[in-house]
Image (cartoon, rainbow, N blue to C red):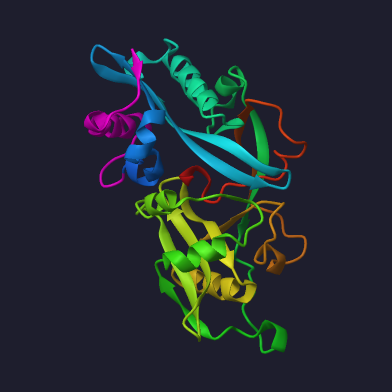
Amino acid sequence: MIEACTPERLLEWWNFLDRAFGYEPPQSYRVDFAPLFEFEALPSSRLLIVDGKIASSAALHPATVLTAAGPVRFGVIGAVATEEVQRGRGYSNRVLLEIEKAAGELRLDVLILWSDKAEFYEKMGFHAAGKQEIYSLDNLPGFTQGARTLRPIGGAREGWTLNAVRSLYTMHRLRSERTDRYWNALAKITSCRRMEWVGKDGLVNAYLGFHRGRDMQNIIHEWGGEARALHALVLAALENNPALLWLTCPALEDPIRALLPRGESPVLEGQLALVKPLRTLPAGAFDSFWFWGLDSL
């Protein structure tokens, strides 16, 4: 039997996912991927039940993504897991087919997920798309006395002022549109460390996020704002976190990457995600899309 998760079954699902992905307290999958488990999102989830227990699962999170080719309706797939003793029986295939049906009912354009099991998903019609790069910040220059590189007045502080960060976020040409409910769900990802730069007028001029979950440790995976303020904020973050790396996309207007020494190569580069189109999309849609926070949605 395959069914959507109910609030009554949510705790069982969380425990199931923690076992499947190897989480140990106090870490938890439900914290790192909080938007998937909002009550409004549960109808789009799918659980395969065997002998009264969850044997396999997946979740679907709709998101409108602004690309250079125009807005595209993505279905973000997460929480794909099968109980270890139940693997090899095709359960994940069955659950993902149900997720695809749900995506069709929601009139989504494309499915997207992140996984190191590309061969498995390729058999289901997924292919690699998008680009990402990770840079070392070891050679990020500081501010000099030159007028054009003077450190901005202000200071860094922990946390985000939500309304200010939301406004700065919309400055990104390539981004996922975020509803009020989604921003509130992001705040529940307590594994992420957030910082912002406050100018002399008390206004927030830049923001960044790093350390989200297990797979984004030491990576600044979300950022935005005025270039000099962002530069100052990154330098402030590096003071206590010198191993931080910078996540970006070649198609982004990136003021920090522009400051790195000319010719510096990324320490890691590759495809962004696995996608499966559900209809014909505008040319170039997969060449210039980006998810801020990546698999943190």
* Region of the chain picked out in magenta, as a range: 1-27
User: Compared to 182, does 130 lie above or below?
Assistant: above
Residue 76 lies, in percent from the top left, at: 51, 36
Q: Residue at x 71, y 66 (%)?
A: 258
The picture places residue 281, in percent across and down from the top left corner, at: 71, 32
Is residue 24 inside the magenta stretch? Answer: yes
Question: Along the horizontal axis of the image, is 30 left or right of 147?
Answer: left
* Residue 137 painted magenta: no
Using residue 54 as the reference point, say whether residue 243 is left or right of it: right
Within the image, what quadrant is residue 231 found in? bottom right
Q: Is residue 95 visible?
A: yes
Query: Residue at 72% of width from left, 52% of height from top?
Result: 251
Answer yes or no: is residue 82 visible: no
Q: Decide: is 226 above or below 153.
A: above
In the image, what residue occupies the spot 57% across and 23% down? Answer: 121
Residue at horizontal 63 percent and vertical 69 percent from the top: 140
Q: Quadrant of the N terminus?
A: top left
